Image (cartoon, rainbow, N blue to C red):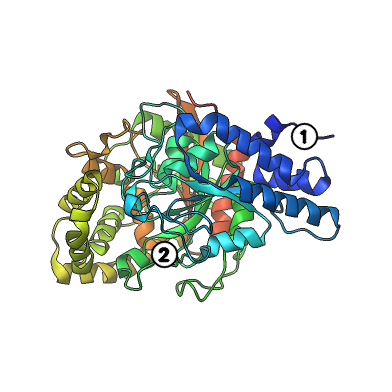
Amino acid sequence: MRVTATELWRMSAIELAGAIRSGQASSREVIEAHLRRIEAVNPSVNAITSLLAEQALAAAEAADRQAAGGGALPPLHGVPFTVKENIDLAGAPTTHGLRALAGAYPGRDAPVVERMKTAGAIPLGHTNCPTLAVRWHTDSELWGATINPWDRSRTPGASSGGEAVALATGLTPLGLGNDGLGSLRWPAQCCGISVLKPTLGRIPAAATTEPVDTPIGVQLTAVEGPMARRVADLRAAFEVLAGPTWRDPWTVPAPLRGPEPARPVRVALVPDPAGQGTDRQVRDGVRKAAGALADAGYAVEEAEPPSLERAAKTLLDMLNTPDIRALWQRTSSLLPADTQRFFAAFYEVAGDPGPVATTQAFMTRQLLLRAWGEFQETYPLIAAPVCTRVPFGAGTDLADGAVAETIRGMRMTIAVNALGLPAVALPVGIADGLPQVVQVIGPRYREDLCLDAAAALEGRLGVITPVDPR
């Protein structure tokens, strides 16, 4: 039985791959269904910036010819995906949201895009992110603001906000984003989708326009990761994307699954990280997740990893080295006013620790990794909020004190970035008209444990997207 166009844009990436493989739908039909959905919905949400419609249709026809020829097909054969604006995608400019880079076409795909194409997936285009991907609200100098489909008055999150909205509204079944200060998990909370923030070194990152002198704090912080509506799609994309390449010297050949943990797997529940307060809507979602994990056989108890606030502050110091501050000061006059305001507020919160203190931060990181590693010998998984606050009003992230407040709310998320740990964020329900999302954090290179727990949560609590914009 053939699948209808409406069904196609609602389906997961794995379901679409199965439909194409079985002949229930052609890749061209899948691409056309998503292009129609984009035409109908994107004008109201501004999620997709550069659309490669003709190239995608041509790739779909080639995929259908390959399928008709028989033989084995790659895992994501004929399935569409989208790519965050700051990741190189051949045929579309890597603008970073800057007008000055509107014609910056890359010389080749980013490694994550290359691997998706090798797996048979077809890129539809780029999605919006804030200028230079440095805010927690998606509004770029070049493309403007992206709209939260649950509540137009609230932020869709950032910096992978365009990708999150595209997934939440059925414009794409699978996406690629990145995360340096919560840029995958915060949009997941705002939009009700699922994401994997991998361990540092698990999934490669590289660009043809990337500076060779990327500060070490940034190198130790930012990672590429898949975004989807279903946990099974995250797992499939993870298996495609993981692995070393010369293009990213941080990548390592770690196994995709580690040793079987002792049963029951123990989970540390952290509903209020560092005891600084958590909004009721967020806290209730985390406790809902705890109940579902307990029902799935996990041993859940409240416990907090050591020195959480210190870990979050360590990342601020790692991003506050003299070379980073000098780079910002040299280029600030070339940046849009909103980006300048964000940097000024961020460094006001971070303070001016000086070169000795910032060097010490990298040693502190090692001590914290050991302490958290010991904690996760007892509690392999940690369940916690992404941000302890509900999504703020669109554009209010630059109000007086707002950057400091967001950093406080994201304290667990920022600590995880400081230590390069893996985490899956996924929806666990809806309350007050907004998604409730939890992040499940694992030990280094144990994405498998995070994905297993996320699958158990999804199996008990369901999925909440795609949605029509409100």
Tell me residue 341's x, y (percent).
20, 46
Q: Is residue 463 visible?
A: no
Name the residue nearer the viewer: 439 or 124.
124
Q: Which mark is residue 189?
A: none
Tag 1 and tag 2, C-beta contact below 8 Å:
no
Q: Residue at x 29, y 46 (%)?
A: 274
Which residue was labeled with disc 1? 3
Please tell me whether residue 234 is drawn above or below residue 148 in the rendered image: below
- Circle 2 SS class: helix
Category of crowding for the residue at label 2, using alpha-carbon neighbours closer than 10 angstroms: few (below 14), some (14–19), many (at least 20): some
Tell me residue 153's x, y (percent).
36, 26
Labels 1 and 2: the sequence-earlier one: 1
- Quadrant including the N terminus: top right
What kind of residue is marked 2?
A: Glu
Tell me residue 303's x, y (percent).
39, 48
Q: Residue at x 54, y 26 (%)?
A: 468
Q: Which mark is residue 374?
A: 2
Q: Quadrant location of residue 306? A: bottom left
